[in-house]
Image (spheres, coloured by chain):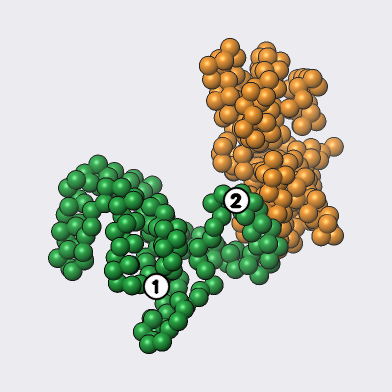
Chain colours: A green, B orange
Amino acid sequence: MLHFEFMATFASEFKRQATKLGADIRHRSLIQKSLKGYEKSRDEKKGRFQDWEAGRQAAAETKWEAINHLDKYLSEFADNIAKRGTKVFWASAAEDARNYILNLAKEKQARTIIKSKTMTSEEIHLNDALSKAGVAGLEAFILCIFTLRSMHRNLSGQNRSAPPSFA
Amino acid sequence: MVRIFEKLGHKIEFDESIVCCGQPAFNAGYWNEARDVGIRVVEKLQTAEVVVIPSGSCGAMIRVFYPEVFKNHPQEEAARSLGQKTYELSEFLVDRLGVTDLGSRFPAKVTFHDGCHGLRELHVKPQPRQLLKRVKELTLVEMEDQTSCCGFGGTFAVKFPMISTAMGEGKCASALETGAEYLVSNDSSCLMHLQGLLTRQKKTLKTIHLANVLASFD
């Protein structure tokens, strides 16, 4: 399952995993390889800027502008995605958001939910709430693209008795 | 280091009663204990013209972190002025004295490891290389991930030995790939960690401090 109950024992769980993975040479070389790939690609992208610090500054200013004018940008964003067929629900607290999602799941009798990987869902403790309600939350992110394809086939199957399991 | 400065005609004073800068306690979150140790450093070094440390780690503690540790304490001003006259060895030689050639001779192939505190807090990077390039019969070969941490990190190695070891093994592998005979650094703590790993791996690559390489003259 994707959900781990280690909030209370986070430190000991971290140490346990670190001991296991730290001794796993194959895992380490995979991480090394992807880190090096990331660094190479980062340096290439950096090389495209005449002044990459100025690029960072411009990005930071854009972010600052957005955060300080959320009243304007959020409603503009909500209007635009609503026009594209997305249903927007405004929640003023984490609980409102969780309840909305849980009620929706209940109403649709969902046993499995595929959600995009967002920090917001972490912040509102959605995984925890879903698991308590007996719904499996599956994170969908780009690296899982092949898994997602097979998941799509699984979900469209008629007599599926258990949610598909993912490593 | 004494040999180097005497050759350059400087007078050295070394106070053996200054045991430690207090960084282990500071890094572990014990600021009061770190300050207790640091007070002695601040007071005893008050009269020195400049303070040179063969370690980017202790250098960073004094120059970068003492102002934080002593903020709103009686030694605040003294700590700040101590920081302003404190240098890591290679930056002192190159930036302050303008010396890059010490007439050293070290016939070996070496690679250089940047200690995190020297590199990231004191921004020491070109200076040791400028010095090593002037050492006769020495060949400097850079390793692939020269700026990555060796994994020591003081108390980090004690709290998370499994991560520390994994990081150190990665660093050793990069150093070994260069085919160098010596792994040089300006921080003894990194060298201690890496030598421990290399010895366990039964490798012939030896660690050596930059000061020892530079002091190789007649």
> Residue flagged by tag 2: what amino acid is it?
Thr
The chain containing the residue under callout 2 comes to A
Query: Which residue is label 2 attached to?
Result: A9
Residue A97 figure quarter: bottom left
Quadrant where the image shows the C terminus of chain A: bottom right
Q: Is residue B2 left or right of residue B73?
A: right
Considering depth in this image, is B173 or B26 the residue closer to the camera? B26
- Mark 2 or mark 1: name the one nearer the start of the chain: 2
Compared to residue B89, the image places residue A38 above or below, namely below
Residue B43 in percent (x, y) is at 68, 14
Residue A154 in percent (x, y) is at 42, 83
Residue B191 in percent (x, y) is at 75, 46
**Residue lying at the far bottom of the rendered structure:** A158
Residue in the picture at 40% in, 72% down: A112
> Residue flagged by tag 1: what amino acid is it?
Arg
Considering depth in this image, is A31 or A47 the residue closer to the camera? A31
Q: Which mark is residue A41?
A: none
Question: Are discs 2 and 1 located on one and the same chain?
Answer: yes
Residue A78 figure quarter: bottom left
Asked if residue B12 can be seen in this view, the reply is no
Residue in the picture at 77% in, 45% down: B192
Considering depth in this image, is A131 or B180 the residue closer to the camera? A131
Asked if residue B216 can be seen in this view, the reply is yes
Q: Secondary structure at mark 2?
A: loop
Residue in the picture at 43% in, 83% down: A160
Between tags 2 and 1, which lies in front? 1
Compared to residue B68, the image places residue B72 above or below, namely above
Query: Which residue is label 1 attached to?
Result: A111
Compared to residue A3, the image places residue B120 above or below, namely above
